[in-house]
Image (cartoon, coloured by chain):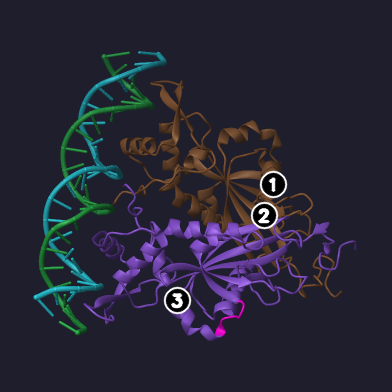
Chain colours: A brown, B purple, C cyan, D green
Amino acid sequence: MTAKPSRPRAASLGFPLPFTTVDLVIFTVSDEALKVLLVQRPEDKASESFPGWWALPGGFVNVDVDRDLLACAERKLLEKTGVRSPYLEQLGSWGGAARDPRGWSATHVYFALIPSRDIELAKGANAADVAWLKVEEVLANPRLGFDHAAILQAAVERLRGRVEYTSLPAFLLAEPFTLPQLQRIYEIVLNRDVDKSGFRTRMLAAQFLVEEGYVEGSSNRPAMGYRLADRSAPVVFPRTFSPRG
Amino acid sequence: MTAKPSRPRAASLGFPLPFTTVDLVIFTVSDEALKVLLVQRPEDKASESFPGWWALPGGFVNVDVDRDLLACAERKLLEKTGVRSPYLEQLGSWGGAARDPRGWSATHVYFALIPSRDIELAKGANAADVAWLKVEEVLANPRLGFDHAAILQAAVERLRGRVEYTSLPAFLLAEPFTLPQLQRIYEIVLNRDVDKSGFRTRMLAAQFLVEEGYVEGSSNRPAMGYRLADRSAPVVFPRTFSPRG
DNA sequence: GTAATAGTGTCTATGAGACATTATTAC
DNA sequence: GTAATAATGTCTCATAGACACTATTAC
């Protein structure tokens, strides 16, 4: 046995096993901005990698606890946010010799969308070392540990790309929500104005909204409230949004 | 040290490390059909899992050889097909306690498109235990090892989905190719006829083809040959193809 | 000439984008 | 009444889809 205790060789394979982790990119919209949940890694421990740096929430797969990768992601999501079942999909995986100073590792990355109201409701469960940071600011100066800057970049591209032609942003709103609220979410994520008439036509034609009765706003004319007909997956529109069609 | 030799505990973590593998879904079009490369697992060895079953090509990540996951995928692709640089993208990852009888494992799956001519050119490099099977037939009776039936299903859905609104099928043709050839690939993958005039307008408007001079066909009028302006990624069309727009 | 395949032209219906207008609330 | 927001109506223009037509080869 020539390997270090932390990096044992698998005798039947003849080479060491990589570390296996799961990381999460958790988005929400609040204060008119797209935000992502980051955790600050312990400052003092010299044994930890990237001490004091910000990083995506995540960690090692525990084969004694986690039935599969999705269950592991759900466990870590619950630990950090207190939220049980938001929209969650796999983003991809990143693995290699250089991304973690502890050795060859591969991470399976999941992508979550949470309404900001759900975060507030579960506030007690929030860990102390976490913070919601504006995506725009993090990307402008991405001092993240590991390869998490690249992962966040990929997640934002995926989100922005999907927003152009799917109902994905609806998972960022608590139900019931109104069409003007949904339009605002689209505008925040896309960082561009959207025409109201076309937006409404498009959303209603896609048949994924169910009327829930009028919602009393803070003032002015009340708007129709909607909920999603299917919370398991977004709807794909036949065309992309963009102008210059 | 309580673990079996093949499943060592990582002392610093307190639980065993999962196995890490890379698998490939390699598509081509030949004989007017979409085909996938499968390997037959060894019959005789009792130690192997799923002996005699068909499975996707792949295997353990070797941290002494593979710089990262993509390099591992490229290595396995070269070993099985002799092809060096086809279109290759990540499909996703699958991991859990139940998918492999040897224990908790996670596989990183890559998705490749290869022109059938490139396979023929590299024929000498093809391993003996591999076969190109029609996707339609495999899916109709999916007796594949591990969770590879589900993975293949996901890969086909990804391919069919992308074909509706990207130039992805162009990676299934050797250059130079003609527009009628490309249209035929679309029709085979989509399993539906496509209008010639609309197809040509769409492809040429997307600006991803470069004229390479007329190609002498076996007979009749010669067609313009094209190559891709950018072999690194497909082009996204602003609309999906036909259906009841 | 015919057959076969490559490539173009024309018509129509759809619907997105732009923007004007009406509707319903609070005050 | 005014202000503010919600919702609808109207017009135009681009283009996808359908299908007819022309072009260039082999024979």
Mark drawn on residue A76 = 1
Q: How crowded is mark 1: few (under 14 residues within 10 Å), some or many (20 or more)?
A: many
Horizontal side of residue B115 vs A125, given as left or right: left
Residue B128 forms part of the magenta stretch: yes
Give the x, y percent position of residue A14: 78, 75
Q: Magenta stretch containing residue A48, yes or no?
A: no
Kindly report the distance in space between the C-alpha atoms of the residues bearing marks 2 and 1. 8 Å
Relative to A169, residue B243 above or below: below
Quadrant in which the N terminus of chain A is drawn: bottom right
Residue D24: x and y in percent read 16, 78
**A103 relative position to B89: left or right:** right
Residue sitting farthest toward the right: B1
Residue type indicated by callout 3:
Ser
User: Would residue A150 be visible to someone looking at this image?
Assistant: no
Q: Give the range drawn in magenta.
A: B125-129
Q: Which of B159 and A55 is in front in this view?
A: B159
- The amino acid marked with disc number 2 is Val
Q: Which chain carries label 1?
A: A
Q: Mark 2 points at which residue?
A: A22
Marks 2 & 3 on one chain: no
Along the polypeptide, which appears first: circle 2 or circle 1?
2
Q: Looking at the image, which residue is at 64% across and 57% down?
A: B94
Label 2, residues with CA under 10 Å away: few <14, some 14-19, many ≥20: many
User: Which secondary structure class fits the magenta region best?
Assistant: loop
Residue type at numbered disc 1: Lys
Q: Residue at x 50, y 42 (%)?
A: A33
Q: Determine which residue is flagged by label 3.
A: B116
Say the numbered circle drawn on residue B174.
Answer: none
Pinpoint residue B134: horizontal percent, then vertical percent: 49, 67
Compared to residue B119, the image places residue A191 above or below, namely above
Query: How busy is the neighbourhood of tag 3: few (under 14 within 10 Å), some, or many (20 plus)?
Result: some
